[in-house]
Structure formats: C-alpha cells, structure tokens
Image (cartoon, helix red, strand yellow):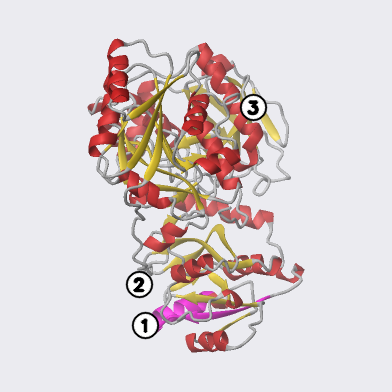
C-alpha cells in the first residue's frame, strides 16, 4: 500500500473508486514520522493547478483522521509530512487506511459533530433549496477534519518550536518599543505587566500617554521609536513584541502592525480566536476590526493626534488617510484578552456613501427569458431612486416572442438600447460591447435575473466610486428564498475563487461580515459598478480565454493591480433569481471550458489567488468560512495591496 518515502507517502488506490465521493483516511503514526500536521495532496487529471492540498492533525498518540469530498478528476493521492513537527529519527512506517464513506455514515457524522451546520443544511432542504443544501453539506464533510482550537494551538506551538524563531540579534537594528498600559484595576494591570516580563524582545519600556504626547510635539522623532498601547488585562504571547517589531526593523515604510487575538477565561484557558483580514479601512471604521495591542511607529503618528483619546483603529485610519506608511497584519494570535478586557470600538460614525441622481450606463446581456428581463426592467425604471440611466441590452440571439415583444416595447419608449450579439454566448464579449457603447462614465454590469430590493441601491453603489481610490463596487445578492448568493469573493476558495458565505442566511452566518461594508478582492459581474475609462485602460473582460467563468475576478484583480480598491456593500442588496434547483454544470463540454478558464486564471494570477489578503491564512479554503486549517498557508506579515 505504501511507498516508504520520508518526504511523502504515496497512497496506492483506484482513483475512480474515490473520485467525487466522501472518504476517510485513518493514520496511526506512533513515532510521528509524518509530524503533527500532515497534508493530503490530491492529484487532479487534466486540471491546473494539478494538485490541491488539504490538512489534518495527528494527536500526541499518533492517531489522526482526515475527512473530505474528493475531486471529480481525482487521479492520485499522497500524504505529505510536516517538517516542523516530524520526528527525523522515526523508523516505524505509519499505518494508513483509506476508505469511502457511505452517505448515511456521512450524514450521521455531520449531524453529531457539526450539529448547528447540519441544521443549516436542513433549513435549506426544507426551503426547497437543493443546490444550496448540497453545497453546504459537502462543505461540512470537508469541515470534519477541522481541529478544535485547543488541539490546533498545541500543534502550532510545536511547529513554531520546530521551525525556530529568528533571533532579534540578527536584525541590523532593534527599535525601542514604548508600552502604555491603560488605566484599570491593579489585578488587570499586573497581568499585563507579567506578560511583558516574559517577552523575548527585551528592548522595551513602559511610557505614559503624556510622554507619547510630548514626543509628538517635538520636532523630529526617532524613526526607530515604536509605541504599543495595551488595555489593562490584555496579555501578550511570549514572542509578541518580537514578531510585531520585526517588520519595523526590516522596512522603514512600515507604520502600523497588528495581529490576531483570542480570549482568556477565568482559569486562563484560551478560546474565541479572532482571525483578522489584512488592513481593511471600512471594517476598522465600523468597529468590526479591533486593533488593540498593535504597534505603531511614533514618527508616523499625525502631530495633532490626541493619543489619550484615539483608539488603535482611529490611529490606523489616520495613518491610512495621510498615507503615513504601510499597515501590516501578522496572522498569528499574539494577544489575549482577559475576562475583563473589552474590545475598544471605533466610533467614527461612517455612513454608506451615496450619490444622488447618478448617471449610469447599465449593460444587460440576455437571451430570451422575458419573465426575468421584465422584472429587471421594472426594478430599474420603477423601483430605483432617481437616476439618469442609459440601459443597453446585449441580445444574444433571442427568439422567444415574449422576450422580443418586451424588448421592442422598451425600445419604443426610449428606455433601452438593444445591440445584437449573434453566435455562442460569450459574457465577456457582451460586456465589452456594452461598455464601448456606454454614454456615461459609470458603467454597471447587470445580469438579467437581478432586481433591486430597495430604491437606493444604485445611489449607494455610485457613492462608493466617489472615492477616487475605489475602482469597482459590488453588493449583497440574495436568492429568492433569502439565502446569500453573493457576499463578495474569496480568492483561492475551491481552487481559484468562490462566492463568500454562499447559501448562508445573512442573519445567521459570516461573523457579522454580511452586515459590514468592506474591501474585498473581487465581486461578481452579476452586479458590478466601475468606470468606463478604467475599463478601457485595463482592457475590459477577457473574451478570448474567460468567456463565462472568472472573467469578473480577472477584471477585479486587474483593478487591484492598478492600485485601486474593490468595495462590497450590503446596503445595496438585490435579488438574484439564479435558480437554486438547477443541476451542476457537469456536461463534458462545460467541464472542459471550466478547466480551461481555471488554467488561465491560475497561470495568470496563481500566487495572488493563493493569498487573499482579506481572508486569514489560518482558515480553510476548502471547508466553509471561518473553519480552522490544520496547516496554515503562510504566516508572514502581510499588507492588503
């Protein structure tokens, strides 16, 4: 069954028996030859990337189990050891057993181990949303391998010891960190000071807020001087100061560094991890993104800042506004909130930007389906608040008499312009033709099965582009049953990208992000607002290689490469009547086309789609959102751009 390789154990299997099926791999590795965080490497026939990687934990006794739903094109499988935790002197071969799970067995496992998520699947079934129930159920199968937080912490601690930390003495400079502890009771202050005393970074001292304020009033501030403000009761991981100071020592462009966090109960046990995105201004302004325990370069602070009044989030927002330096995120849990240590919420009072009576060219690719198109038109002309609309319908060979009559009626009223596009459906070409014909600078790509839920959706989307640093905006799209169709796009989910929070209820998922206006890496072209000039500058959509899938993601990545932001907002919520009961796109022709478009995206953007800045690398890209990944993808400090 096994080829005895130290780096990798190939599994001998009949791939066709396991393809597109749930499996369990049981491992007994008493000497930890594979380490504590082995990865499962799945080879995919005729696909790029050719392999996908998943991970699971092996406990201290050498036992572990991996659960997962296999790719349709499964060709081979291997176990890859974890070099940071593997026992280099191990001689005993791990015992590995792989088998297929029956559907009944999987249902029982998910119901027992992931009960709340299983209830979500049942709700989707009861609502008649078979596609959503199937999607979420497969995600729960993949989530069965997710470790609990205590086991994950143990494995990560072993990995850090195995990797070894860079010595502070290796740095060319060692910045001094001034640490201010907020007022609090003596017990909380003592707990914070106690954690400071254990730090591997010794170049720090306590400083009062008045000392920091006095420094700001001086002329030139030493650029090697850093400042950390800690709420009383917040405790630091032993390597916290070192890991937070290191980016400043390496680059003079760094102005602000923050980290992930968790909580401590009354017995000192850690729980409730908060894995954060890279810098996201809207989330910091709303208070969703707490930044207590961050480190800032004193020379980057605005001179008029009231350090005694400003929260960490307000400081970061000021640095971002004045472009005083880079804001980095260290995706490690380095700070812990004690029982009495509450998160400081920013109160910037940020409102959804809104442009009254916007001038927008709307591009709607369509073919037949008069019922959908009429609802879309009524939403534009009857529901939408005052706007100067230039509606362009790209008609891809409509033959249905009702659709043709509908188009003719709206054309005669002067409300729409119709452009014929004969031949095979090419979404990218349709959009490019529409933008070329647009009269206004703001252009909206809109599916024919999307309709507004309120009047101000377009004003809110247009308001986002009043900010010259924003290149495109998208919004919350809901299925007819109220479940999420689009909550932004997560790069790398699946393989290339996947809609965030797909088939979750907006009030029962997403850790509140479905109620938060925020920066994202991409949004769907089912409703995407951008500028005509930018569109032409970037070359629009790729109508040669990305005719159907990923063309919107490709465009958004070009927008971000140009240094502009993508904003997603829930205030512009719309209904997307994409059928929730249709089958999968699994015909041979569609599978070949999808594989080709997947290859194009991976070859064009491979490194980027593997590292979405707005999704934490400690979280799974295969299972559902906010599920722990046993083997994190990369823990280096990261920026949003």
Q: Do labels 3 and 1 touch, CB within 8 Å?
A: no
Spatial CA distance of label 2 from label 1 is 10 Å
The span shown in magenta is 175-195
| Residue 369 percent location from the top left of the image | 32, 18
Q: Secondary structure at mark 1?
A: loop
Residue 33's image quarter? top right
Which quadrant is home to the N terminus? top right
- The answer to which quarter of the image holds residue 205 is bottom right
* Residue that badge 3 annotates: 50
Label 2 neighbour load within 10 Å: few <14, some 14-19, many 20+: some
Out of 637 and 281, give the one closest to the viewer: 281
Regarding residue 539, the answer to whether it shows in the image is: yes
Which residue is at 56% across, 17% downward? 592
Q: Are marks 2 and 1 in contact (CB under 8 Å)?
A: yes
Front-most of 569 and 365? 365
Image spot of residue 206 (x, y percent): 54, 84
Q: Is residue 183 magenta?
A: yes
Whether residue 107 appears in magenta in the rendering, the answer is no
Q: Which residue carries the number 2 mark? A: 340
- Judging depth in this view, the residue of 202 and 527 nearest the camera is 527
Q: Which-is-in-front pick, marks 3 and 1?
A: 3
The numbered disc on residue 185 is 1
Q: Nearer the viewer, residue 78 or 335?
A: 335
Which one is closest to the eye, mark 3 or mark 2? 3
**Image position of 500 with respect to 289: above or below:** above
């Amino acid at each position: 069954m096994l080829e005895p390789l130290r780096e990798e154990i190939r599994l001998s299997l009949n791939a066709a028996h396991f393809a597109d099926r749930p499996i369990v791999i049981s491992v007994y590795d008493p000497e930890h030859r594979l380490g504590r965080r082995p990865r499962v490497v799945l080879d995919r026939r005729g696909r790029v990337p050719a392999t996908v990687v998943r991970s699971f934990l092996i406990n201290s006794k050498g036992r572990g189990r991996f659960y997962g739903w296999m790719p349709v094109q499964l060709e081979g499988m291997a176990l890859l050891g974890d070099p940071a935790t593997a026992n280099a002197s191990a001689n005993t071969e791990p015992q590995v057993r792989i088998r297929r799970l029956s559907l009944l067995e999987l249902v029982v496992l998910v119901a027992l181990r992931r009960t709340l998520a299983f209830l979500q699947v049942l709700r989707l079934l009861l609502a008649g949303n078979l596609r959503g129930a199937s999607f979420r159920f497969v995600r729960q199968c993949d989530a069965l391998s997710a470790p609990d937080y205590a086991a994950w912490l143990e494995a990560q601690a072993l990995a850090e010891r195995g990797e070894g930390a860079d010595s502070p003495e290796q740095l060319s400079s060692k910045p001094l960190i001034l640490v201010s502890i907020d007022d609090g009771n003596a017990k909380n202050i003592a707990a914070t000071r106690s954690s400071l005393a254990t730090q591997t970074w010794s170049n720090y001292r306590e400083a009062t807020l008045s000392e920091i304020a006095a420094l700001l009033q001086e002329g030139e501030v030493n650029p090697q001087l850093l400042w950390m403000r800690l709420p009383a009761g917040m405790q630091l991981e032993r390597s916290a100061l070192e890991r937070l100071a290191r980016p400043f020592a390496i680059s003079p462009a760094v102005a602000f560094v923050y980290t992930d966090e968790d909580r401590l109960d009354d017995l000192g046990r850690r729980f409730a991890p908060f894995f954060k995105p890279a810098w996201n201004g809207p989330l910091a302004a709303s208070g969703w993104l707490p930044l207590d325990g961050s480190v800032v370069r004193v020379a980057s602070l605005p001179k008029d800042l009231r350090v005694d009044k400003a929260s960490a989030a307000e400081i970061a927002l000021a640095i971002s506004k004045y472009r005083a330096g880079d804001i980095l995120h260290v995706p490690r849990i380095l700070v812990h909130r004690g029982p009495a240590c509450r998160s400081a919420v920013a109160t910037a009072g940020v409102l959804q930007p809104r442009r009254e009576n916007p001038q927008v060219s709307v591009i709607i690719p369509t073919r037949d389906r008069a019922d959908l198109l009429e609802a879309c038109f009524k939403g534009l002309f009857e529901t939408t608040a005052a706007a100067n609309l230039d509606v362009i319908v790209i008609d891809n060979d409509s033959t249905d008499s009702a659709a043709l009559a509908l188009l003719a009626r709206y054309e005669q009223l002067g409300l729409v312009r119709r452009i014929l596009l004969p031949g095979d459906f090419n979404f990218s070409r349709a959009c490019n033709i529409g933008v070329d014909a647009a009269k206004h600078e703001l252009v909206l790509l809109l599916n024919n099965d999307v309709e507004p839920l309120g009047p101000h959706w377009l004003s809110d989307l247009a308001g986002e582009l009043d900010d010259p640093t924003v290149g495109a905006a998208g919004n919350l799209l809901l299925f007819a049953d109220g479940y999420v169709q689009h909550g932004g796009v997560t790069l790398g989910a699946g393989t290339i990208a996947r809609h965030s929070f797909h088939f979750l209820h907006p009030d029962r998922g997403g850790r509140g992000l479905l109620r938060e206006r925020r920066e994202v890496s991409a949004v769907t072209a089912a409703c995407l607002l951008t500028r005509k000039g930018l569109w032409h500058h970037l070359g629009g959509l790729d109508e040669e290689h990305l005719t159907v899938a990923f063309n919107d993601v490709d465009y958004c990545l070009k927008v971000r490469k140009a240094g502009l932001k993508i904003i997603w907002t829930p205030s512009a919520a719309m209904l997307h009547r994409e059928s929730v009961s249709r089958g999968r796109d699994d015909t041979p022709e569609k599978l070949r086309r999808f594989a080709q478009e997947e290859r194009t995206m991976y070859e064009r953007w491979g490194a980027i789609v593997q590292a979405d800045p707005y999704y934490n690398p400690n979280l799974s890209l295969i299972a559902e959102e906010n599920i722990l990944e046993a083997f994190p993808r990369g823990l280096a400090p990261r920026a949003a751009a």
